[in-house]
Image (tube, rainbow, N blue to C red):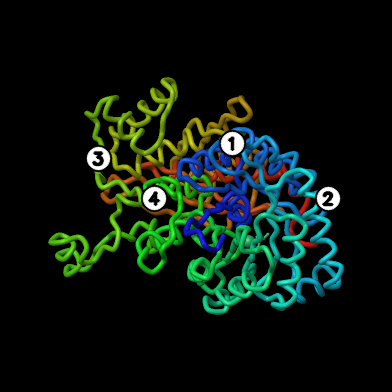
Amino acid sequence: MGSSNMVKIFDTTLRDGEQAPGCGMTVEEKLRVAHQLEKLGVDIIEAGFPISSEGDFQSVKIIADTIRGCEIAGLCRANYNDIDRGWEAVKGAEAPRIHTFIATSDIHLKYKLKKSQDEVLEIISGAVKHARNYTENVEFSCEDATRTDLDYLCRAVELAVRAGANTINIPDTVGYTVPEEFAHIITTLLERVPGLDDLTLSVHCHNDLGLAVANSTAAVQAGARQVECTINGLGERAGNASLEEIVMGLKVRNDQNPYITRINTEQIYPTSRLVSQITGINVQPNKAIVGANAFAHEAGIHQDGVLKERITYEIMSPEEVGIPSNKIVLGKHSGRHAFRTRLEEYGYFLDDDAFMKAFVKFKDLADKKKYVFDEDIEALISEEFVRSSDFYKVISANYSGGSDMRPVATIKLLIDGEEVTVSEVGDGPVDAAYQAVSKATGLSPTLETYNVASITEGIDAQGEVTVRVEDEGAITQGQGANTDIVVASVKAYVNALNKLRWRKEHPKRATMKGL
Ligand code: KIV
Ligand code: ZN
């Protein structure tokens, strides 16, 4: 489809994004992200890798059965078992897609697959034909395409086209290519592979050299019409091409990139926040488009310029990407109506019960803080209503200590519906509290990182704690916010433990390595 100027956005936050260490999401969390992606207007959601675990299968299935308005893809290696299981998961979608792949580079063939080029060609043909028995909507990817011999890549793609794939994806799996080279690969494929021009040519770039967005954009200029990307650039290693950067690059520089997407750009920031809250992965402050400083003007000369005329230093407006202009929200005299309006502006539509619970929490917070900012409300809503807390919930966290006294913490948790109270002493209040939580839950992972930051400015600001824990190879992240940082620390730890337990109960059975 090289001639149309419409570029499809294929979001793989729930599949490739989730492969990033500590980014695992529960079924419920994935469904929330999928609803938001639908609102954002992505064309395709890659919901997971169904054969990899029971949890992934369930997530893909529930997303396929629920989400309408975009295609739902499931990733499958190029073998019949994967494809059968993948189809089971996606078949309930309005427009289901099977996405099957195999590596084509000599490096992968020799060291990983231990197969010859001819054997791989046969596998491609068989897998795509098998997928076509289920649906016409079949995507085929040549893993490590950018390190594949170009003549062989053309042969592999030609076979996939002949076997019936309607989308061909060219991944830069290890983030190795550079824009001119990648554009050349795309142009060559379009010139040499018969019929490819009538199908969708897609690209999928990783960010190991920081070039994922530049490479994807160069590929679009060369004729690719689908871009695979993730929210906040989440993904394996250095991540994938960031959706927000690609979309805004095409929009803001439409003079150079005369292409359009279906993305509702005002939903970019809410989607970025949701993904960050659910995964516990903070967005770096200087991240393009969605970072906290992306629209902050520190230098006096810049501030002066922006106040006189915004376009002096701003190439797009914060509102265009959904960053709310009004930062100060509410105080302790604000009523229900104002609170509900603010929540709805943020995209949180709570039923009456949930709303009343949130309102009580808001009043509680407003008693402790003079001003309640957007970020405070987000943290409050995210803990209560956005993330899953199926197993453990914090009821209370109290502690005492000081320079002359060993710290003691008493933690009350709801564990699988039952209240459990445990007290422990520790080296500090957070240590005591974490020991109590570990004793109560029976989970004692290694605490890999612990960070605390203030959510907003001011002495009464809430502290936001982010932790990363590891247990037998499983890594999860947790976040918690409170005006008391020990309480925030307990919430963050419990959030990470909830995900850890979910991980243990839904182990990965298959990986993308091999067949
Ligand atoms: O990076 C990659 O090669 C992939 C493919 C499976 C599309 O994620
Ligand atoms: Zn990838």
Element assignment for label 1? helix
Task: Tell me the residue that label 4 is attached to.
Answer: 265
**Kind of residue at disc 2:** Tyr
Q: Which residue is mark 2?
A: 80
Q: Which mark is residue 371?
A: 3
Check disc 4 and report its element: helix, strand or loop. helix
* Mark in front: 3 vs 2: 2
Residue drawn at (54%, 45%) of the image? 493
The amino acid beneath tag 1 is: Glu
Quadrant field for ligand 1:
bottom right
* Residue type, numbered disc 4: Thr
Q: Residue at x 54, y 58 (%)?
A: 229
Q: Residues within 10 Å of mark 2 (few under 14, many from 20)?
A: some
Left or right side of 138 for 38: left
Q: CA distance from mark 4 to mark 3?
A: 29 Å
The C terminus sits in image quarter: bottom right
